[in-house]
């Protein structure tokens, strides 16, 4: 790929698995894999903005 831009998740069954996670569980994954500085409130706002509120 060569760039750091996140790509949209496809419509596979695995792509929707995060919907089953609690906000705190998703936060732990995001901090480990994407951005260690993300805040809980920031992640919550992002999910709400994109229609994925938990």
Image: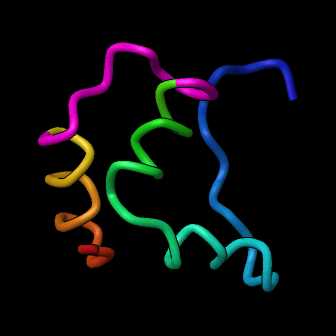
Is 14 in front, or is 23?
Answer: 23
Magenta-tinted stretch: 32-41
Quadrant that contains the C terminus: bottom left
Number of marks present in the image shown: 0
The x and y percentages for residue 8 are: 63, 59
Q: Main secondary structure of the magenta part?
A: loop
In this rendering, position of residue 26 left or right of residue 11: left
The x and y percentages for residue 50 are: 29, 68
Asked if residue 39 is among those painted magenta in the image, a careful observer would answer yes
Q: Residue furthest top?
A: 37
Q: Residue at x 47, y 21 (%)?
A: 35
Q: Residue at x 65, y 75 (%)?
A: 17
Is 2 in front, or is 38?
Answer: 38
Residue 1: quadrant of the picture: top right
In this rendering, position of residue 11 left or right of residue 42: right
Relative height, residue 47 to residue 7 (above, below): below
Relative height, residue 54 to residue 4 (above, below): below
In this rendering, position of residue 2 left or right of residue 21: right
The x and y percentages for residue 53 are: 24, 74
Q: Residue at x 14, y 53 (%)?
A: 45
The image's colouring method is: rainbow
Q: Residue at x 50, y 76 (%)?
A: 19
Relative height, residue 27 to residue 52 (above, below): above
In this rendering, position of residue 31 left or right of residue 49: right
């Amino acid at each position: 790929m060569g760039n750091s831009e996140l790509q949209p998740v496809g419509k596979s069954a695995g792509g929707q698995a995060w919907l089953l996670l609690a906000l705190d569980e998703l936060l732990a994954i995001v901090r480990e894999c994407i951005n260690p500085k993300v805040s809980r409130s920031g992640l919550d706002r992002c999910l709400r903005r994109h229609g994925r509120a938990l």
